[in-house]
Image (cartoon, grey):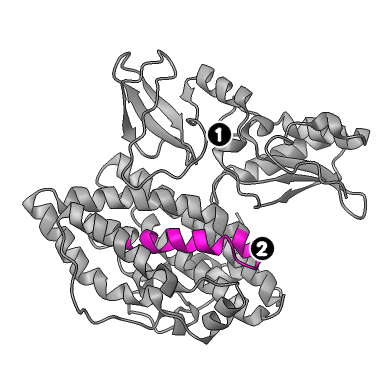
Amino acid sequence: MANNSARFHYCLRLADNANVLAHRLCQWSGRGPTLEEDMALSNFGLDLIGQARSLYSYAAVLEGAGQSEDDLAYLRDANRYGNVLLAEYPNGDFAVTLLRHMLYSAFYYPFYVALSSSADEELAAIAAKAEREMAYHLRHSAEWVIRLGDGTEESARRMQQAVKVLWPFTGELFETDHVEEELVASGVAVDPESLREQWGSTVAGVFERAQLSVPQGAWMQSGGRRGEHSEHLGPMLAEMQFLQRSYPEAQW
Amino acid sequence: MVALVRSVSDARHSAEISDPELQCAYVAAADVCDPEVPVLTLEDLGVLRGVQRDADGQIVVRLTPTYSGCPAMHAMREDVMTALGGIGLANARVELVLAPAWTTDWMSDAGREKLRAYGIAPPLGRAKKRGLFDQESVPCPRCGSSSTEKISEFGSTACKAHWRCLSCSEPFDYFKCL
């Protein structure tokens, strides 16, 4: 199959999304509000690390430059990362973390369902596994958005505040650039525009049950695909990459 | 190359393999137990996708992960290699395959019954897409009561949830339907 370079970049961005969000979730390990939710967040992180590993490994094959999954995850600087800004947004409180996860899963669940029909068989196989995982990520995070949004005065205030800070990062989910447009045309990539209606109705359904209001006409942030990140990604990668940077090729 | 496993129903037909060395390799790999749910063999779990020879004649055991990030995959690989080494086939190798994706539909009926007898509620029925707000009802693996409640979506491993029986009061693991 042609356009290896475009597929490499596409695959790498998907891997970066999963890896960055996984690391954020792992920062909750041992700090969850209850043991059950501590395990839930760590399990979500584990699924995403699994997805990231498959995607980085395949990206390394597409690149054909002899890099490993670890090289791609641990030896690239923030301006080489192509994840969406939503994934790197700091955990904040439990409301921010769960809303971030719901907004992300509401997009990536139908995304991976669509990608499982990709003309690229390896991407299709990775997507078919990820799809089932994102389905229960969405279910669990949506339940929490509803419980907190429709909960006490304090939990509702915090969830509405989370909506306010995260909403500007949702527009980027639907962006494309020349890399993706080329791959959409050849049946490899998913056109995110085709998911807008489903994402919108999932989120609206959850917000309605949670008694949350959807911000109107918000300014949308952008830049992740181009390596233009928030000030939060660099410090996160510094922590995540420390071991491989200080002890190159360390194994465990 | 002979592909031995093409679907769920084919998965347990080791008898169809005519190459005696391959057949031994299949049986040895099939009998390896899941490191996290040791009551199930890899064959019961449905993660053994077949044994074949590559173009150079090397024996290749094909395994598929349950969840993308299943931490037991590494141990499964090592356990299969140990089992093959034990019957003089240490030069075989294990290969990971992703497609078709594993679901709980790949678990054998014998495997489901072993789980229940072990005190873990087996996955309910067949994998299907549950609506976003649909609730599950899981019968207690000990007393059979359907009066149960979920304690935690995630239990002792990624593939299990933690439940409690309201009739006999026993907490139990539920192997989630994926």
Q: Residue at x 14, y 59 (%)?
A: A158
Residue numbers of the magenta segment: A103-124
Neighbourhood count class around disc 2 (C-alpha, 10 Å): few under 14, some 14–19, many 20 upward: some
Answer whether residue A122 is magenta in the image: yes
Q: Amino acid at mark 1?
A: Glu
Q: Chain of mark 1?
A: B
As drawn, the label of residue B36 is 1
Give the image location of residue B28, x and y in percent: 78, 31
As drawn, the label of residue A31 is none
Which residue is labeled 2 in the image? A121
Left or right: residue B58 compared with residue A213 = right
Q: Residue at x 66, y 52 (%)?
A: B99
Q: Residue at x 91, y 55 (%)?
A: B55
Q: Residue at x 92, y 49 (%)?
A: B57
Q: Is residue A29 visible?
A: no
Give the image location of residue A88, x and y in percent: 36, 70
Q: In what element is the residue under mark 1?
A: loop
* Residues at marks 2 and 1 on the same chain: no
Nearer mark to the viewer, of 2 and 1: 2
Q: Does A79 sit above or below residue B110?
A: below
| Quarter holding residue A120 | bottom right
